[in-house]
Image (cartoon, rainbow, N blue to C red):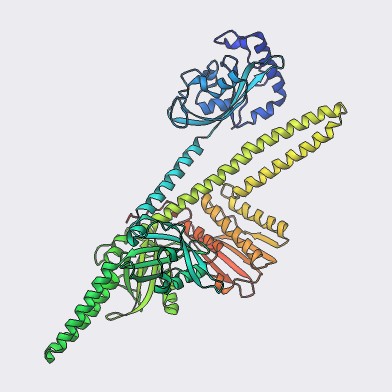
Amino acid sequence: MTKKYRQPGRRPPTAEGLQPAAPVPSASVNYAEGFWRSEDRYRSVVTAMTEGMVLQRADGTIFDCNEQAARILGLTQNQILGKSSRDPIWRAVREDGSDFPGEEHPAMIALKSGRPCRHVVMGLHLPAGGRRWINVNAEPLICASDTKPQGVVVTFTDITERKLAEEALRNSEKQYRALFANMQNGFAHCRMIFNQAGRAVDFVYLKVNPAFTRLTGLKHVVGRRVTEVVPGIRKAHPELFEIYGRVTRTGRPEKIEVKFKSLALWLQIAVYRPQPGHFAAVFENVTERKLSEEALRHTQGSLEQRVLERTAELNRINLALRESEASLLFDSQVMAKMADGVQVVRAKDLIIVQANPRFEFIFGWGPGELVGKHVSVLNAPVVQHPEKTAREIKLTLDRQGEWSGEILNRGKNGNLIWCYATATRFDHPQHGAVFISTHHDITERKRLEQEILTISDWERRRIALDLHDGLGQILVGASYLAETLKNDLVKKSSPAARRLHRLREVIQAASNQARILARGVQPVEPEPNGLTAALNKLAMQTHAMFGVRCVFRCRLAVNVGDPQTATHLFRIAQESVTNAIKHGKARRIVIRLTQNRQQITLAVTDNGLGMAAGRKHKTGMGLRIMHYRAGLIGGALAIKNNSAGGAAVICRVGLGTAGKLRKTKGKKN
């Protein structure tokens, strides 16, 4: 982006050649020309600048500029020369959108005050349309024999993308706050308090939404203990403290229904752990449903009593009626009353036998269209075949009786839908052993999470570019200047030459550190073989830093065209290497990257202690983030122990889905 100020051999512009709007004292002209003659020795530094730069006389007239300034301002150099800050062509505005008069521009302030005017943000209307935001610095040029500035140097950088990113982040935060404030279910984020014996004895409300106050009637609870807000609750509902404490300790989510006599309502509570030591609860008022069920049970009892008093013929009818009522009760309680989508799948052949209207709506099927179809029609063909995914979930249900987690489904028209699903094995009065699963559409939440992660990655890349192109270039220029001054002092045999040499070493070390920081913020270069190069560098750095033998193997070239997919795979490998050293005490680590016609496979194996049984699940923050990153790029992550010792982390990403899931948008509920 750096440009030359002039062609080789061209003299710097003079006052006579520019025809200023007002006469300029000869001292000003001589000073400006003298300045440019001295600047010739530093021309290599100036041409390396990424900022736009203009030079203005004491009357504010521009008499020179670089090509970077012309690019940023959307004008040619000839169009800029001769203009001043007062020229109406700029149509400048402040950050709040108000007009920015020319007399108040940084250049004019520096000329009037004789002091630098720095870090001023202004917006300019481009001739081709649109607005460009710049950060401006103005430095006055003052002769040693004069107290008034003879000119001013103005440098500025294009910060339009940063302003747009800040606006996007503000909009994203606004959407999150609107969702939190307007959701119909109550929400409470709390910190659990344990006694010395490890039992949950109290918790503190950290954050609640308006629906929580509306459902419970509890006000001003943030920062207070629950035993203070609801006296006697620990004695009245000890099961709450047991469940909240268990979720906080284990991280496994649970769902319960509790009748609060003091509040005169039934609540269905879904509990999960957002971070260690904390739990979050989502409340749904199910009082009406519970009252209806109680009334239904009362009616049933009365009906059965009357039927028993009738004749034998009525007894036969009553038997059929009870069977019908059992089926009706099953349907009404499990299906009709559920706010989420619910399906019933026959265990022996995985055929869908029932689906509630909400389930059909989420997946875009009409009433009754799913009945008789294999459950695999709902599984997305990512990484592995849908039928294999269905068999793996069935195997877990057969062994443990339940399964829950996030799963990528597909709708009738092929659209991808993220759901949080919970499946349990039951005995159905008509179909025998069945799997009942509830599905909650989280597609929009996954999209918002991806947007936040994308903004975060974009900010990392921007910081890396700023470190490399901004601070790095400045340090290179300072190092060059220090070297030049050192050579001059050495010729004069000055003792300060040694100190200046030390100064140059310090500047060079700072430049090297800036490059290291830039690589750390953006570890994968945005090119097809960037992932291969980054993984190879990770192996070498691990060996050099920890003394662990770490090698990278890639027999055939693996080109990942999507930068975010490459970055997520690198971060998974980086976290796996860290876990192998920190937790597994490994002395040998192998990073492998392979590709076939269907998928890309990243594998990190070690010879350490292996994964403890409790850590194979997504309980640790690092493991959860690895699973989450794999899901964002349409991949699957597996963590297992090797038979010969050590652990293996394997991530597979389908070639047809890498980088595509980030663009997926599901239906709005």
The front one of 330 and 539 is 330
The front one of 545 and 122 is 122
In the figure, is residue 585 to the left or right of 458?
right
Q: Position of residue 613 (x, y in %)?
A: 56, 74
The front one of 426 and 142 is 142
In the figure, is residue 82 to the left or right of 516?
left
Q: Position of residue 72 (x, y in %)?
A: 53, 28
Q: Which image quarter: residue 25?
A: top right
Q: Is residue 136 visible?
A: yes
Q: Residue at x 49, y 51 (%)?
A: 453
Q: Position of residue 308 (x, y in %)?
A: 16, 89
Looking at this view, name the residue that lies furthest to the right.
Answer: 493
Q: Residue at x 60, y 39 (%)?
A: 466
In the figure, is residue 312 to the left or right of 340?
left
Q: Residue at x 70, y 18 (%)?
A: 37
Q: Position of residue 535 (x, y in %)?
A: 62, 55
In the picture, which quadrant includes the C terminus? bottom left
Q: Is residue 263 above or below residue 459?
A: below
The front one of 563 and 181 is 181
